[in-house]
Image (cartoon, grey):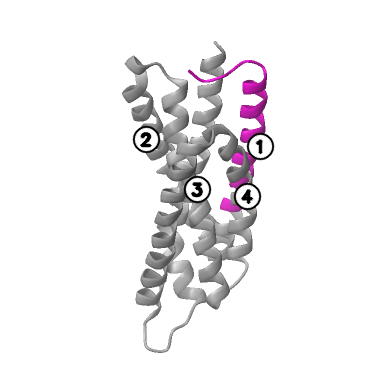
Amino acid sequence: ASTRRTLIWVYGIMIVLGFVYRGVMTYLPKFIGERFEVETLSAVVAGGLFASISLTVGGLGQIWGGHLSDKIDSFKIYNWVVPVFAPLLLIAALFGGWPLIVGMCVFFFFFFSSQPLENQMLAQATPPAWRSTSYGVKFGLNLGVGALAAPICGWIGDMWGMGWIFYSLAIVLLLAGFGVFGLRRVKERGGQPG
């Protein structure tokens, strides 16, 4: 029962992160294209190019997160990393030009570091016979709920502008931060994985 509670909290946090991931990925090139002008590039090309650079830095974050999870308890690292997502995204979204690009690189570095941590957490919290199923549930929930981000964020952008898409996603990330505290309480009360 305690392991099931742990999984419920972990899945809840992952759903929130999947929603934000899809929203950011859908609108980031356009957002950067509007806020970062390069004389020799169109807004479309600049948005795509610098979104790609930000995501490449995020890939380094995945390596870092995987490396840490081999040495330190993934749950402990996750408790530290997830609460910084909301302020990092909000700070990045408030700026334009190079501060926006640097801010998005920092955000993606930490945001993507959570994915190998989550995989390790699922492996620890599920019996071997259910491990592949647990990953299937994770990706199914991420893709299913994440798909809602495109129309919802599109509506927000139409109503209040592109900036508000990212401000709103930062607010949604607060749910993941609060979810980490719930996960921590469950583990302290006996919801140890394994």
Q: Which residue is mark 3?
A: 20
**What number is the disc on residue 178?**
1
- Disc 2 and disc 1: Cα gap in Å? 22 Å
Q: Which residue is mark 4?
A: 84
- Residue 65 % position (x, y): 47, 45
**What number is the disc on residue 139?**
2
Q: What amino acid type is highlighted by mark number 2?
A: Phe
Q: What amino acid type is highlighted by mark number 4?
A: Val
Q: What amino acid type is highlighted by mark number 1?
A: Phe
**What number is the disc on residue 82?**
none
Q: Residue at x 37, y 35 (%)?
A: 139
**Magenta residue check for 187:** yes
Left or right of 87 in this view: 123: left
- Residue 61 % position (x, y): 46, 53
Disc on the earlier residue, 1 or 4 = 4
- Disc 2 and disc 4: Cα gap in Å? 23 Å
Element on which disc 3 rests: helix
**Is residue 140 something that shows in the picture?**
yes
